[in-house]
Image (cartoon, rainbow, N blue to C red):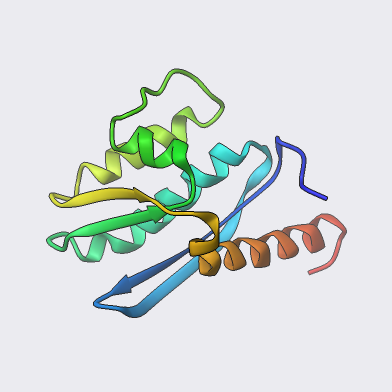
């Protein structure tokens, strides 16, 4: 059963350089938040992590067509509960001289998807009074 939207928002990301996995991250984006809010929270966290590589060409692969198309300027941002996260992601992206966004199918994003599920499981445990 899928989480209602809005609901518990989580994210996951991996960072590679020259085919080698450097680091990854996952976390809780909030509740209740929309999927788009969680997607942008993950992008913000990933861009913050790669700031130590300011002169590198950054390619962000995402299974969110909304994120990719808005960040590439193909789709306009109109409104949404994720406005602050979108603006923060756009501000961070502007600090990289070489950054591109590419859409990938969800099946190609399994590492980040798995990290998001780990974060979701942690969020559920916290919600139920666990860890």
Front-most of residues 102 and 85: 102
Q: Is residue 34 above or below residue 9?
A: above
Q: Is residue 106 above or below residue 68?
A: below
Q: Quadrant of residue 53?
A: bottom left
Horizontally, residue 25 falls left or right of residue 22, namely right
Q: Is residue 110 above or below residue 60?
A: below
Residue at the top extreme of this rendering: 78
- Of 21 and 110, nearer the camera is 110
Q: Is residue 26 left or right of residue 129?
A: left
Q: Position of residue 105 (x, y in %)?
A: 49, 54
Q: What residue is shown at x 43% (from left), y 40% (from top)?
A: 67
Residue 54, given in percent of the width and then of the height, sits at 17, 59
Measured as percent of width and height from the top left, residue 115 is found at 58, 67
Task: Tell me the residue at 17%/60% (across/down).
Answer: 57
- Position of residue 89 relative to residue 112, above or below, is above
**131 horizontally vs 81: left or right:** right
Q: Quadrant of the C terminus?
A: bottom right
> Could you tell whether 69 is left or right of 4 in the image?
left
The residue lying furthest to the right in this view is 128
Q: How many marks?
A: 0
Residue depicted at x 55% and y 61%: 107
11 or 66: nearer the eye? 66
Q: Position of residue 61 (x, y in %)?
A: 38, 56
Residue drawn at x 81%, y 55% as measured from the top left: 127
């Amino acid at each position: 059963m899928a989480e209602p939207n809005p609901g518990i928002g989580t994210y996951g990301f991996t960072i590679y350089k020259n085919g080698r996995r450097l680091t990854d991250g996952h976390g809780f984006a909030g509740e209740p938040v929309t999927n788009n809010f969680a997607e942008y929270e993950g992008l913000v966290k990933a861009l913050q992590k790669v700031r130590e590589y300011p002169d590198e060409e950054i390619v962000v692969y995402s299974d969110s067509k909304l994120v990719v198309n808005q960040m590439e300027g193909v789709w306009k941002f109109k409104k949404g509960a994720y406005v602050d996260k979108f603006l923060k992601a756009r501000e961070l992206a502007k600090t990289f001289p070489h950054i591109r966004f590419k859409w990938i199918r969800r099946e190609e994003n399994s590492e980040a998807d798995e990290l998001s599920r780990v974060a979701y499981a942690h969020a559920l445990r916290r919600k139920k009074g666990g860890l």
